[in-house]
Image (cartoon, helix red, strand yellow):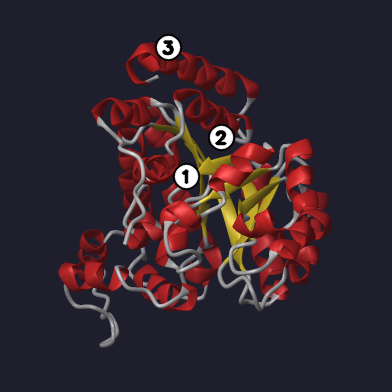
Amino acid sequence: MALTKYECNAHMHSFLKELPKCEHHLHLEGTLEPDLLFKMATRNNIQLPSSFPTTVAQCKAKYEDFADLQDFLDHYYVGMSVLITEEDFYDLAMTYFAKAKEDGCLHSEVFFDPQGHLQRGIEFDVVVSGFNRACEDAKIKFGTTNKLIMCLLRHLPSSDGIQVIESAGKYYQDGIIHGLGLDSSEKPFPPELFENCYALLKENHPHVELTAHAGEEGDHTFVERSLDTLKVTRIDHGVNSKHSESLMKRLNEKQIMLSLCPLSNVKLQVVPDVGHLPIDVFMEKGVPFSINSDDPAYFGGYILDNYVAVHTRFGFSLEQWKQISLNGINGSWCDEGRKQELRSLVEVVCTKYARIID
């Protein structure tokens, strides 16, 4: 049962919606809603496994009841199988960018998993071309800015990661792919397994930004080892950082942002409710974080839903929400000019609502 403590009234909801947001933890493949999944399966003549739900309603029911991260991943990878053509990848991303803009998200740095497609015989160029075209069109259509972050699947060997990084070289060189991440099952696959992958990419493309999933399943040392071994400048999830005072101090002093995913953490049973997350602790300790939706098609909430869920548990003031928004902007990998545009918009929105909700 949800531990709602604070009301998100109409004024607060409008404020949270208008507040400029940046999303840093969003898997494009995780935005594949059941209706689009079945549509693509039909147009690509894909026969889904007999164990997979056969209707949109059955899909949604399953998504309400994942046993754990692996149960989710098993369904997630089946869902990916319907993505075949460049148009599929384009449609998937554009659907997300439209929803993000509706939620007041003006800058997105989105993950994609090329290995999950290469293993199915889908060419790297098909995946990136579709996603990149959507990024460009979303800027024109919605006025948003968007960057691609390629993730390595940590359940696959690092030698496979090396091959993918080499295949992506031209896209990193041309600035089409902006960062590198590390996702999939965390606990059996510690960050040091991928030290060679991260070192190779940074050696060949020093301008590329680095992040990694850490401290969701794994303990706080997974965060520390990602910082020390992989040389990341951002941490995805990182909720278990709360167990180390020295780590939280380091995150504060270095302004290393955590990309938190509240509703995801509940769905995957990291915590029983959003209210159990250490969001208030991070706030108190000055650990910068952003609020994100992770795999919203599977976890039942896009970015605004996550903002509202956090508010109903923690009841943050306008000034605290302003700081969360600014932390997200400051921790983004867009240029300083874009950051300043977004900061100015934050001021406009906060000024508009200051007398209404405080």
Check the image and report above or below for 19 versus 306. Answer: above
Q: Amino acid at mark 1?
A: Asn
Q: In the rendering, at what x and y percent does residue 71 appear?
A: 42, 78
Q: Position of residue 89 (x, y in %)?
A: 38, 55
Contact between marks 1 and 2 (CB within 8 A): the answer is no
Q: Is residue 113 left or right of residue 160?
A: left
Label 3 vs label 2, nearer the camera: 3
* Residue visible at 36% across and 60% down in the picture: 299
Regarding residue 141, the answer to whether it shows in the image is no
Question: 286 or 59, which lies in front?
Answer: 286
Q: In this image, 131 relative to 91: left or right?
A: right
**Disc 2 target residue:** 328
Q: Assign the C terminus to one quadrant of the image.
A: top left
- Going 48% across and 73% down the picture, which residue do you hit? 69
Q: CA distance from mark 3 to mark 1?
A: 35 Å
Corner quadrant of residue 314: top left
Residue 194 x %, y %:
74, 67
- Of the numbered discs 3 and 1, the one sitting upstream in the chain is 1
**How much space separates mark 3 and mark 2, taking CA atoms?**
19 Å
Considering the numbered disc 1 on the image, is that residue within a helix, a strand or a loop?
helix
Q: Which mark is residue 351?
A: 3
Q: Which residue is mark 1?
A: 132
Callout 1 crowding tier (Cα within 10 Å): few <14, some 14–19, many ≥20: some
Q: In this view of the protein, which residue sits in the foreground, 144 or 243? A: 243
Rendered-image quadrant of the N terminus:
bottom left
Element at label 3: helix
Q: What's the residue type where badge 2 is placed?
A: Gly
Q: Is residue 147 visible?
A: yes
